[in-house]
Image (cartoon, helix red, strand yellow):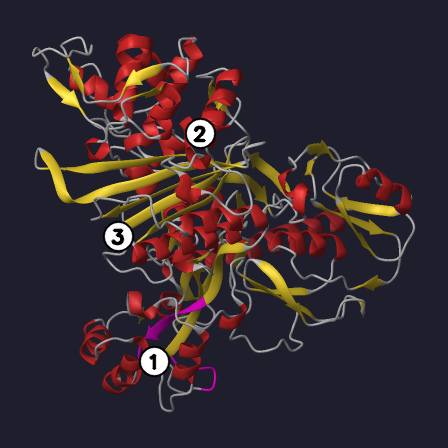
Amino acid sequence: MKRSNNTLRFLYFLMLGVALVVIVNVFLVTIIKLHIRSNTSLDNYVQSVSNVEEKIFASRGNIYDNAGAIVAQDVKTYDIICYLDTDRLSSSNEVAYVDDPLFTARALAPILGMEESDIYEILTVNRDLYQVELGAAGRNLSEEQKNQIEAIEGLHGIDFRNSYKRYYPYGETFAPQLVGFAQSDNTGKLIGKLGIESYLNDELSGTDGYHSYQRDKYGYILPGMYEETQNAINGYDVYLTLDVAIQEALNTALNTTMEAKNASRAWGAVVEIKTGKILAWGQTPSYDPNDLGPDDVQVNYGSQLAYEPGSVMKAIIYSAAMDLGVYDGDRAFDSSPYCYTATTGRTYAGDQLGCIYNVSRLDWGNIPLDYGLIYSSNVATATLLSQYVGISNYEEYLNRYHLYQRVNTDGIDEVSGYTNYGLSPVDDITATYGQGSSTTMLQLLQAYTAIFGNGEMIKPYFIEKIVDPNSNTVVYQGNRQVVSTPISKDTAKQMQDLLRRVVSEPDGTCRHYAAKTVEVMGKTGTSEIPLDGGYAEDQNIISCMLGFPYEDPEYMVYFAYVSPETVYFNYDIKPIPDLIDRIALLENIILPEDGENNAKYIEKYQMPNLLSSDVNEAKEILAAMDSETIVISDGGKIIDQYPKYLDDVYTYQKVFLLTDGNSITVPDFTGWTRKDVINYWNLSKLSIKMDGYGVAYEQSIAPGSGIDASSELTIRFRDINYVEETATEEPIENSEAE
C-alpha cells in the first residue's frame, strides 16, 4: 500500500513537471519567439506569416423585364495584381514578382489602354509594397485581355483576381434613366449609382462573405495554418413592369421623330391605364450604361424636367366642369379673343387687363363648348373657368389631380414643378391651357389614368416584384395603388367620348394621331419654353396624350419633343400612330380585318379553369368567347393553360392549352406577336430563338413538322409596317436555340 502511494506521488510530480515545461515552452514560443529545444529564434518566421481577410463579393441580383428578359446582370471580369516583393518566389523557386518594371509597363500599356509612364511609375514608386493594382484601367478586364497578358513571355509577378462588371444587354435603348447603372468602387464592389440600381442597391447587393487565412511572406497558405470561409449570400432579383418589345417601339418613335422634326430632344412613356404599370419609358438623347463618360448622364426628362405642358391640361378643366355638373357640350361660346378683367371675367369694353387668343389667333365665331376642346381653343377654357367652374373650384381639381406634387414612385428622381395659379387673373386663365405653370410627364401620366380610366387616379410604377433567388421567395410585390378619385366614373366616360372626337373629327387637333388598328382618344399640346423672363423664339414643346382602345381603354401613350417648328405642330407625326399600332399588335388588341367584324367591340372575359378538362370541351368554351385556341401536344386532357384561371382574356386573343400528349406539332407562327410566341414557349418548354420584334414572318421548322426538346427552332419577326421590297434578311438556317 505504501509503495503504491509513492508511485502515485511520483507520477503526479512527473506530470506536473511536464506540464510546466510545456507552459514555459509555449510562453517562450509565443511571447519571446524562442524555440527552447533548438535554441532557434522564431522571430523571422513569425514576421513572415500574415493574417489575411479577403471579401467574397455576393453576386448582384439580375434585373428583368416583364417577360423575364435580362436587362442588367453581372459578367465575370478580372482585376490585375502586380506583386513587387523581391522575396516572393513561386513553388518551383522561380521569380514571382515584377523584376523588370519597364518591360512590364511596355507590355501592359496597349492592352490596358494606359500610358507606359503611368504604369512604370506605379511599379517603381511603390517598391516597398507587397503588391499593387493599376487603378481603374486594371479592373474589370475581359477574358480576352486576361489571355493576351498571360500569353506575354518573360512577364513575371502578374496575377488576376476574379471580379464582376455590370452589363446591360440593351444599352441605351432600355430606359437607363429608370434602370440606372452600377459601377465598381475602389475595392471592386459593384455599387448602384442611379435609378433602380441605386434605389435598391442594398437588395441587389446581397451580403458579402469572407475568406480569412494565414499566409507566409511568399503569399502561400501552408498546411495547418488558420483558414476560415463564410460564403456570400447573393442579392435579390428585380422584375420590372417594362416591356422590351414596347420599349423598342417607343425608342423607334422617339428617334424617328427627332430626325423628321429636327428636334433637339424627345421623351415619352407607355402606361397600362388600369394598373399604373409603366411599360416603356424613354428619351433621346440618352446614354449607354455600359460605356459611361463624364457627360453621358442626362436629366430624366420624364420626371426631372418640369415644363409648361400646353393644351393637354385642357382636359383637366373640362373634366372639372363635367364633374361639377355645369357642363353642356352643345352650349355655344364666343371663340373670338377673350379680354379679361381683374376677376378673370370677360369684357368687351375698354377696361380689360389683357386678352387671351387661340393659337394663330384663330376665331371660329360662336361654336359649341365640345368644339372648344376638339379645336383646342384657349378661349374655351377661359370661358369655362370664369362662367362655369370658378377660381376656387378649379384649384380644388388641380389638387385632386395632384398636379405640381411629386408622384413619389419607386425611387424615381423627380421635381414637383410649380404653379402661379392664384397670383393674378392671367395666371389663373393660362393655367387652364397649360401655360404659366409647370408639370412633369410623370404627373401628367398619373392624372390621365383617371380620365382614361374610371375616375380613379392610379400611381404609375415600374417595379413588378423583388425575388430572393436563394429561396425563390417574393419579398416585394408591386400593386395597383389608387392615389385619389378626382372625378366620377361617369365624368371619365364623358371625357373619353369627347377625347375620341378630338381624334376622329375631321378638324380635330389630334386627327393625325389616328391609328390603323384601334380607335384612339387623345389631346395634343403645344407650349413655349421660358427664357430670360420671356419665351424662346425658336423652340417649342409639342406633345400628345393618347389612350386606346376607346371601347375599353387599356394603354396610354405620352409623347413630347422640342422643335423649332412654329406651325403644323401635330402634322406628319406618323411615328406615333405606328407606335400605337405596334403596341396594339404586341398586346393582342387588334380587331380582325374581315369586313363588318372590324368594327366589333373587344370584349373582356375571365379565363375559366380548364385544367383536367377534355380538349374538345375546352375548345367549345373558348369558342363562345371568340378566342383563338392553340393546343400544344396531342393529348386529350388539359394539364396547363395560359391565360391562367381568372385572368382577363379578350376577344380574338390567343389562348394556349397544354395537353398530356407526348408529341408536339409545329404551328404556323406567321402573324404571331412576340408576346404570343413567349406564351407558347413558356407552356411548351421548347427551345425557341427569337430574332427581331413585331410580327413573326419566318420560322426555321416548317408548320406541321414534329418537334421536341432537342429541336432547334428560330422565329424571325419584323415591323408591322414592313414593306416587302425593303427586305434584306437572308433565309433562316437552323441555329442554336436560345
Disc 1 versus disc 2: nearer the observer: 2
Rendering coords of residue 152 (x, y %):
38, 88
Query: From the viewer's perspective, is 278 left or right of 593?
Result: left
Q: Which residue has dot 3 on it?
A: 263
Q: Which of the 4 quarters of the picture holds residue 123?
A: bottom left
Residue at (8, 33) in percent of width and height: 533
Q: Which residue is denoted by mark 2 in the rendering?
A: 499
Disc 3 from disc 1: Cα separation: 57 Å
**Magenta stretch containing residue 89, yes or no?**
yes
Q: Which residue is drawn at 49% across and 69% down?
A: 221
Q: Earlier in the sequence, mark 1 or mark 2?
A: 1
Question: Disc 1 to disc 2, how far (Cα)?
Answer: 75 Å
Say which amino acid is labelled 2: Leu
Where is residue 138? Give x, y as percent. Answer: 33, 70
Q: Nearer the viewer, residue 219 or 545?
A: 545
| Residue on which disc 1 sits | 97
Q: Indicate which label's residue lies in the foreground, 3 or 1.
A: 3
- Taking the spot 30% from the left edge, 65% from the top edge, the residue there is 136
Please report whichever mark, 3 or 1, sits nearer to the chain's N-terminal start.
Answer: 1
Cα gap from disc 3 to disc 2, whole angstroms: 27 Å
**Residue positioned 52% across, 53% down in the render:** 245
Quarter holding the C terminus is: bottom right
- Is 465 or 401 nearer to us in this picture? 401
Check disc 3 and give the amino acid type.
Answer: Ala
Write the start and end of the magenta stretch as one range. Answer: 77-92
Mark 3 / mark 2, whichever is N-terminal: 3
